[in-house]
Amino acid sequence: MEQMPSNSFGPRNQVLQVGLSNAPVTAEFHLPPEQPQTPTPPPPCANIPFSRDSDFVERGEILDQVDKRCSEPAARVALVGLCGVGKLQLAIEYAHRIAAKQADTWVFWVHAGTEARVLEGFWAIADAVKLPGRNRPKENIPQLVYHWNQVLVHALERHIARSQLSTAVCLEESVCGLD
């Protein structure tokens, strides 16, 4: 009996090659056609993967400063500091406060530790806002979300339907090497 090539990774995982084919392998995915979007977009929502910390310790006026700086369209704020000083807890608390205070605001959390996590976050945004084209196999989802966000910012600048157009995106990166 002929020995089949095999490989293992980890104590309980093994790969066994069954058969041999030198032919090219192709795959096609046939997704159902997207349903036409209703003229009304879904209502704003918050996508925060962390619960609010009931033991959150106020840190003076830091959250007020973050709120003030984030109040302008397309504003960005970075929380910088040593590991363990509470940057992540500040970001979580701020995201929850915005979601509670401004029901007409989209709040998204995008993990920025790896490229795969960023892409996953943008897929979640595209699904939450039901962006047309998000199910196309070769669609550039980050570009699709970026374009959607730019349309919202442009609308805000022109004061068109100010409610339901504010966006807040929280990017979290594991600076200390912990997820």
Image (cartoon, helix red, strand yellow):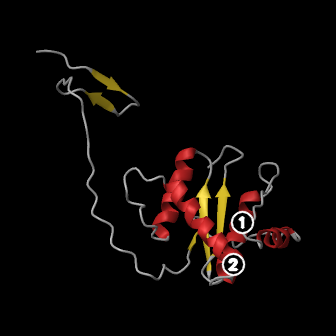
User: In the figure, is residue 161 to the left or right of 69?
Assistant: left
Q: Is residue 167 visible?
A: no
Toward which corner of the image does residue 70 lie, by quadrant? Answer: bottom right
Classify 78 as above or below 50.
above
Whole-percent x and y of residue 27? 26, 42
Vertical order, 82 against 131 (above or below): above
Label 1 sits on residue: 74
The answer to which of marks 2 and 1 sits earlier in the sequence is 1
Give neighbour class at mark 1: few <14, some 14-19, many 20+ (Cα, 10 Å): some
Spot the residue most to the front.
Answer: 158
Q: Is residue 157 left or right of residue 151?
A: right
Is disc 1 placed on a helix, strand or loop?
loop
Q: Is residue 67 visible?
A: yes
> Residue reaching furthest top?
2
Density class for disc 2 (Cα within 10 Å; few <14, some 14-19, many ≥20) is few
For disc 2, the marked residue is 158
Identify which residue, 133 or 67, lies in the foreground: 133
Q: Amino acid at mark 1?
A: Ala
Residue name at image x 77 percent, y 52 percent: 84
Give the residue at the far right of this rendering: 60
Tell me where residue 13 sits by quadrant: top left
The three-letter amino acid code for the residue at tag 2 is Arg
Q: Is residue 112 left or right of residue 76?
A: left
Q: Residue 153 versus residue 29: which sits nearer the camera?
A: 153
User: How far is the residue under mark 2 from the one under mark 1?
Assistant: 14 Å
Q: Are marks 2 and 1 in contact (CB under 8 Å)?
A: no
Label 2 residue SS: loop
What residue lies at 38% left-to-right and 60% top-to-bottom? 135
Q: Is residue 6 left or right of residue 55?
A: left
Q: Nearer the viewer, mark 2 or mark 1?
A: 2
